[in-house]
């Protein structure tokens, strides 16, 4: 194959099924590798690992494996130095940790907090701690968040070298919890926030779990579906309400009052992702087929318009991710398609 000298600005991959969850790999030796989760409304779903072959300018499938129910989130271990095992986690009925081995991805462990019951409370989301990759926090429809401790012992010859235990479980909200995210504040290990069906953003500290701080409450108690911390300035976070066309930017130093509202989407917003390398850029995506990049450095002055807009002609964008180790690239999912866009 002839090497393509001119790099394209957009690469597209068409999956065999509708896509929902998606995440960029962080490892330095696995450029342009992403994990994708199917969204099929039945028990049998799939996860696929794809990577861009830069010689032929096309995505190739590295591994496909079965997953019960659609994944609510997929995340690679936040290991930018490549010192941990090559792990991937998924949430759905339970939290599962997988080891990416080509061509077979191997299930390492299923982390289930309901040992005494046949009923499982589905997990809505999770986050993997960047400072301590042995910590994963999950959120559930049963009003709780659970912090898991992983053991990733690298014992040669052992079949299962990854396990986990519950470090703590707490009732985080009055209703279902829809998202959880660790903050980089205070060392980046102990602080996290959650959002839920009660319309609040709450902040917790693993060192003082007896109380939490309410950072924001939606005036109409509309459920909040997603939250994302600014990657460079831990004072800021973004959240979106159910069926809302605006993104709310919060400053933890000024609780309960949004510092900005981003209002350019013409249909409900589905995803938010802060720039990995800049404190003043955030991208958003929604049912209006648009991915927008905003510059928020004018805050608290109103942010009128995005600085970049991309339209996916064929579908509503349900997922957006900014490459942590490749900040020039944003990935989006719509219908059965993954696209990565150079910005």
Image (spheres, helix red, strand yellow):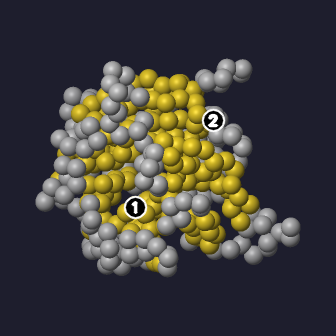
31 or 109, nearer to the observer: 109
**Image quarter of residue 223:** bottom left
Residue at 27% over, 48% down: 195
Tag 2, which secondary structure? Answer: strand
33 or 19, nearer to the observer: 19
**Residue 26 against residue 315 in the figure, above or below:** above
Q: Is residue 270 left or right of residue 214?
A: right
32 or 43, nearer to the observer: 43
**Image quarter of residue 148:** top left
Can you say which quadrant of the picture contains the C terminus? Answer: bottom right
Residue at 35% over, 27% down: 118
The x and y percentages for residue 182 are: 39, 42
Sequence-first disc among 2 and 1: 2
Total marks drawn? 2
Label 2 sits on residue: 106
The x and y percentages for residue 139 are: 34, 40
Question: Going by the picture, which residue comes out furthest to the right?
Answer: 1
The x and y percentages for residue 120 are: 34, 33
The x and y percentages for residue 141 are: 29, 42
Question: Which mark is on residue 271?
Answer: 1
Label 2 with label 1: CB-CB less than 8 Å: no
């Amino acid at each position: 194959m002839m090497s393509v000298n001119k790099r394209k600005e957009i690469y597209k991959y068409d999956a065999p099924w509708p896509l929902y969850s998606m995440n960029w790999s962080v490892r330095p030796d696995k450029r342009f590798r992403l994990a994708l989760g199917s969204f099929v409304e039945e028990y049998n779903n799939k996860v696929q690992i794809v990577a861009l072959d830069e010689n032929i300018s096309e995505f190739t499938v590295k591994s496909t494996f079965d997953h019960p129910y659609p994944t609510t989130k997929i995340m690679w271990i936040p290991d930018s130095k490549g010192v941990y095992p090559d792990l991937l986690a998924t949430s759905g009925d339970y939290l599962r940790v997988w080891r990416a081995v080509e061509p077979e991805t191997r299930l390492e462990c299923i982390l289930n907090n309901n040992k005494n019951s046949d009923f499982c409370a589905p997990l809505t989301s999770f986050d993997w701690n960047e400072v301590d990759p042995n910590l994963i926090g999950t959120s559930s429809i049963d009003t709780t968040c659970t912090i898991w401790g992983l053991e990733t012992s690298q014992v040669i010859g052992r079949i299962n070298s990854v396990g986990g235990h519950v470090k703590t479980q707490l009732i985080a909200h009055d209703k279902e919890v829809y998202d959880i995210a660790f903050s980089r504040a205070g060392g980046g290990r102990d602080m996290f926030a959650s959002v839920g069906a009660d319309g609040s953003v709450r902040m917790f500290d693993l060192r003082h779990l007896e109380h939490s701080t309410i950072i924001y409450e939606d005036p109409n108690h509309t459920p909040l579906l997603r939250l994302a911390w600014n990657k460079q300035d831990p004072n800021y976070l973004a959240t979106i309400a159910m069926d809302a066309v605006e993104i709310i930017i919060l400053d933890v130093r000024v609780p309960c009052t949004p510092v900005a509202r981003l209002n350019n989407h013409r249909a409900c917003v589905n995803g938010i992702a802060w720039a990995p390398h800049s404190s003043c850029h955030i991208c958003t995506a929604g049912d209006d087929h648009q991915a927008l990049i905003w510059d928020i450095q004018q805050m608290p002055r109103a942010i009128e318009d995005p600085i970049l807009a991309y339209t996916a002609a064929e579908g509503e964008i349900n997922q957006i991710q900014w490459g942590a180790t490749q900040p020039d690239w944003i990935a989006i999912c719509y219908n059965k398609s993954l696209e990565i866009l150079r910005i």
